[in-house]
Image (cartoon, grey):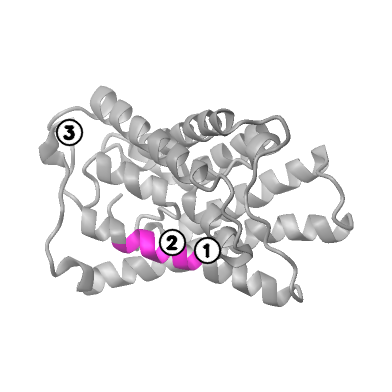
Amino acid sequence: MPINKIAVGTPGEASHPDAIRAAFAEFFSTLIFVFAGEGSGMAFNKLTNNGSTTPSGLVAASLAHAFALFVAVSVGANISGGHVNPAVTFGAFIGGNITLLRGILYWIAQLLGSVVACLLLKFATGGWETAAFSLSSGVSVWNALVFEIVMTFGLVYTVYATAVDPKKGNVGIVAPIAIGLIVGANILAGGAFDGASMNPAVSFGPAVVSWSWTHHWVYWAGPLIGAAVAALVYDNIFIGDGAHEPLPNNDF
């Protein structure tokens, strides 16, 4: 990947009205996604009196996250690109599709959106715990790291293929649902092992509100590595030098 694809951005970019609107879009999209996703898990715990996770519970979590992400990406797509995920933003930066400064603004908005969603859930449920992501029994941090890398690779590869690639054509229409479906499928694959985060913001909000940071680094390192690899692979093999369109305000 030529280094000239990576852009830092200008000092005034963070205060530009378009950038501020995009950050607000990321905040609200992430809030919507985390509220529904984390809330589905809390609803399951209420219905089962904090019973153990069952196959039906895993399917319910998969569907809730897939549907919510489909909506969250859709409502933010025309304003911010609908990243809803620091790993997606990082992958876009690695591929030269967003500047560093704008990416940092997105990260702040996404993390705040997740924290606010979890605080709202805690209040709305009368003080129920927003459980932080954790590893299942018998799963090591290295097992979880590989899971997060591979699952996030699949997610960001899908983002590139359906939303970033300038040759995507009509495929771009299905980008939000394709992105939601790969996350739902990955939850079915990895949810029983490490919770299948694929998204540092999704892990960050519950960790802050419950103040539980055990193995939290896995949910940052894995998604960021997976996103970077996916961006490099797709950009170099399928987009190539000179194939980039000019960076639009909406990034994707």
Judge whether residue 113 is colored magenta: yes
Using the image, determine if residue 106 lies above or below residue 165: below
Judge whether residue 7 is colored magenta: no
- Assign a secondary structure to mark 3: loop
Magenta residues, start to end: 105-114
Taking the view exactly as shown, the residue that stands out farthest to the front is 214
Instruction: Inspect this view and state whether residue 249 appears.
Output: no
- Assign a secondary structure to mark 1: helix
Q: Disc 2 and disc 1: Cα gap in Å? A: 6 Å
Using the image, determine if residue 143 lies above or below residue 130: above
Residue type at mark 3: give it.
Answer: Ala
Q: Which residue is mark 2?
A: 110
Instruction: Inspect this view and state whether residue 93 appears.
Output: yes
Query: Which circle marks residue 114 in the picture?
Result: 1
Check the picture and name the quadrant holding the N terminus. Answer: top left
Using the image, determine if residue 30 lies above or below residue 7: below
Q: Are marks 1 and 3 in contact (CB under 8 Å)?
A: no
**Is residue 29 rendered to the left or right of residue 55?**
left
Q: Going from the N terminus, do you reach mark 1 or mark 3 first?
A: 1
User: Could you classify mark 3 by the number of other residues whose Cα lies within 10 Å: few (under 14), some (14-19), or many (20 or more)?
Assistant: few
Q: Which residue is mark 3?
A: 243
Residue 196 location, quadrant: top right
Q: Position of residue 169 (x, y in %)?
A: 33, 38
Residue type at mark 2: give it.
Answer: Gln
